[in-house]
Image: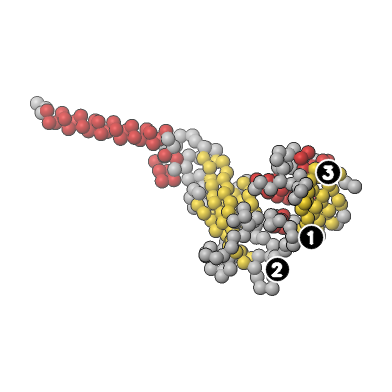
Amino acid sequence: MVSIKSLSRYWILILVGGLIACLLMVAYFSGLFATDAFCLFSPGAAADGEATAKVLTWTDLNGNRVPDAGEPPLPWVSVQLSYDAELTNAVGAASLGVFKPGCACRCWEHESVQVVIPPGYRATTPTEFALKGAETLYNFGFQVPANTQPPSFAGEPDWSHALINSGLTITAFHFSDSDRYLTVTIKNDAGQDPELIYYTLFKTINLLADANITIWKVTITLTPPNEISTCSIDTINSWQGKITYSKTVQSYCSHP
């Protein structure tokens, strides 16, 4: 005969088990199992995720690969995570993220974040890091070699370094803040396809627009062959200064 005490224990076990089951269901449907901490317990259901990274670019004055107090940020550096390209902002920071369809957890695996070394600098840290987790911070340090002066344009806005750091050889730069008019001279000494030069320029202008820096008109002098193009950016599939570049972009530009 089963005692009342035994039945009480039996019902307590049922209640505790039911409570645990309810908590697990809440955690599952709230997406808790999709986090890295619970990845091994993921039920394998179809889901979408994201690989993310945070970046700091700074001037590593002492070359010890660690951002120390008093070492200034290095803004307007090009960084990339898969297809997401960004510029670090005025304090050298950037956040990147790429959509990973069908990824329930640990979506950062097999992804890496990389940086383009600005002209006139050398890297003190690796220029590429394999992602180690979600929302992890990756520090990229740079130093100016002895007897080297990084290129700059006196009297021009600090964000001019975004174009300098884009990989284009900028020999002249002027920006009029009153009418958001940029004039720039680009040297094509490597004989690069002009379409690629236009692409890089407008891609950088897009990234500047993400940083709330808008340019409405640009005159480009490409040397050689001394080709001059004036482009009204608000006609190139633009929205608040952002351009969608295509192979027909030059059809929107005048060629005097």
* Quadrant for the N terminus in the image: top left
Q: CA distance from mark 1 to mark 3?
A: 21 Å
Residue that sits furthest to the front in the current view:
178
> Residue 19: horizontal and vertical position, in percent?
29, 33
Residue type at numbered disc 1: Thr
Name the residue beneath numbered marker 3: 253
Does residue 199 show up? no
Category of crowding for the residue at label 3, using alpha-carbon neighbours closer than 10 angstroms: few (below 14), some (14–19), many (at least 20): some
Residue picked out by circle 1 = 171
> Residue lying farthest bottom?
147
* Disc 2 residue crowd, few under 14, some 14–19, many 20+, Cα 10 Å: few
Mark 1 in CB contact with mark 3 (< 8 angstroms): no
Q: CA distance from mark 3 to mark 2?
A: 34 Å
Element on which disc 1 rests = strand
Residue 122, quarter of picture:
bottom right
Depth check, front residue: 244 or 247: 244
Instruction: Classify 240 as above or below 146.
Output: above
